[in-house]
Image: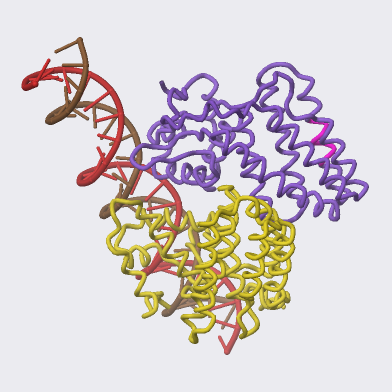
Chain colours: A yellow, B purple, C red, D brown
Amino acid sequence: MTIADPQLTQLNSPPAQAGEDRAMTIRDHLRDAIVDRRLAPGTKLSEAEVGTLFDVSRTVVRAALQALAFEGLVKSERNRGAFVANPSPEEARQVFDSRRLIEPGIARAAAGRLSPSDIATFRKQLIEESRLLAERGSLARRAEIRASGDFHLLLASVAGNVILHRFMEELVARSSLVIALYGNSGASSCGHNEHADILAALESSDGERAAQLLVTHINHIEADLDLRQNTGLPLREALSR
Amino acid sequence: MTIADPQLTQLNSPPAQAGEDRAMTIRDHLRDAIVDRRLAPGTKLSEAEVGTLFDVSRTVVRAALQALAFEGLVKSERNRGAFVANPSPEEARQVFDSRRLIEPGIARAAAGRLSPSDIATFRKQLIEESRLLAERGSLARRAEIRASGDFHLLLASVAGNVILHRFMEELVARSSLVIALYGNSGASSCGHNEHADILAALESSDGERAAQLLVTHINHIEADLDLRQNTGLPLREALSR
DNA sequence: CGGCACAGGATTGCATACAATCTGGGCGAG
DNA sequence: CTCGCCCAGATTGTATGCAATCCTGTGCCG
């Protein structure tokens, strides 16, 4: 059960980053792979194996894995190793509860600060989403989920609060994991039209409406999941019953 | 310019932790020292020095420092080292903006879940705060600030959302830093009575009122700071010490 | 035949060694 | 005297080695 399948090989090509921080580069690549579902929840991330893939020592890999563990994307167990997080339905609910609490506030803040260049960026983002929505194939589907998350991140960045932005980065990433695990419909889960509506509300400086649309949007995403308790049981306890 | 002053010597006594995670132990001790102001903002945390103090290798220290950097309590600059964070007034405002956004939601959630044993814990907490409020001396003042933060953390823990709880841990810790930096009044900044009022609202299951009191409370804390822009010299935190 | 003990291998935790980079001071030229 | 360069010390970044721990599979015993 090695992680070196063909689709992951692309991880191997960080184009010789400049003297930057290699641990963070690896962290970013792993995070992308996780939210893209190229790495399934529960997959073991062996230090040696990751190190070989990226051609660095375990020291650097450990730093990257620790960072991902902080973000909740990786669960690290002492003397056992690091695994792609496998959020329980309860955790999944908490992710969306948190988003329902935080994102409306972000929307209100963003509504008051939206610059013309922000609007342009948003439009480009929506166009990209449309393009991916039209495309077929699992690869496009992945990119679409990613782009959908980027919309929310863009919103957070416009709001101008770096702390909340980081919180949102974590929440969006974990949402991707949760959707990967509990996603139900074949239909695209993240209604793209809703994003456009939210942007429209922002453009008319109607932060309150944007906030409300956002909550509805999050509700839709969560409603599309199957968060029944059964699925989440760890193997051991499943056998005990 | 060593950090081994008399008041820090107490860091040196982790009573030989069991096989637990030493990096996290060191992280906790450092965090305590930072929020207690025993380590001033801007202080350099040399890996070798910290390692000597705790009698571990730099490897472990690096893990602890990375954790603190992730929480925003430490700012780590490549090839230069780790420093106790020195938040700008703008960052300080963002901390409180974040708290105003998140804590009311936590209060509403907590109001619906408050158990009798929770109430008992809260009461003990308030008594402790009163005790410290009465005491004199900088040591008691530190403990009081700490205890005041613990109230908010307790609230988050009652709310039952582990993600939001972690966010609050970060925000409370950063608040302590900010208060240390920009605190104005000699008077106790964190009105203890307000905590009691909040608890009363929670006990009567009036989450809305608790939320509102909480916002007022946060406003009071922030109002007690001097967040004028003047300090904002990005000049390398010039003379920050 | 099933359960338990134990050894082998593999993996992580930690310490240490070495390389890369930064800081600060001294020295020389203008 | 001031400015700039260069070198030495110090500090961080990374790799590697060793010890501790955990998992697996085998063989023994009930």
- Tell whether B123 sits left or right of A46: right
Residue in the foreground of this view, choosing between B5 and B236:
B236
Give x and y (percent) for residue A56: 31, 59
Asked if residue C28 is positioned above or below residue B161 in the image, the reply reads above
- Tell whether D29 sits left or right of B60: right
Give x and y (percent) for residue D7: 13, 29
Q: Quadrant of the N terminus of chain B?
A: top left
**In terms of image quadrants, where is residue A192?**
bottom right
Residue in the foreground of this view, choosing between B95 and D19:
B95
Give x and y (percent) for residue A5: 38, 79
Q: Which residues are magenta?
A: B122-128
Residue ID at (59%, 56%): A156
Magenta stretch, overall SS: helix
**In terms of image quadrants, where is residue A153?**
bottom right
Give x and y (percent) for residue A119: 55, 60
Asked if residue A183 is positioned above or below residue B182 in the image, the reply reads below
Residue ID at (79%, 20%): B134
Residue ID at (62%, 69%): A195
Q: Is residue B125 magenta?
A: yes
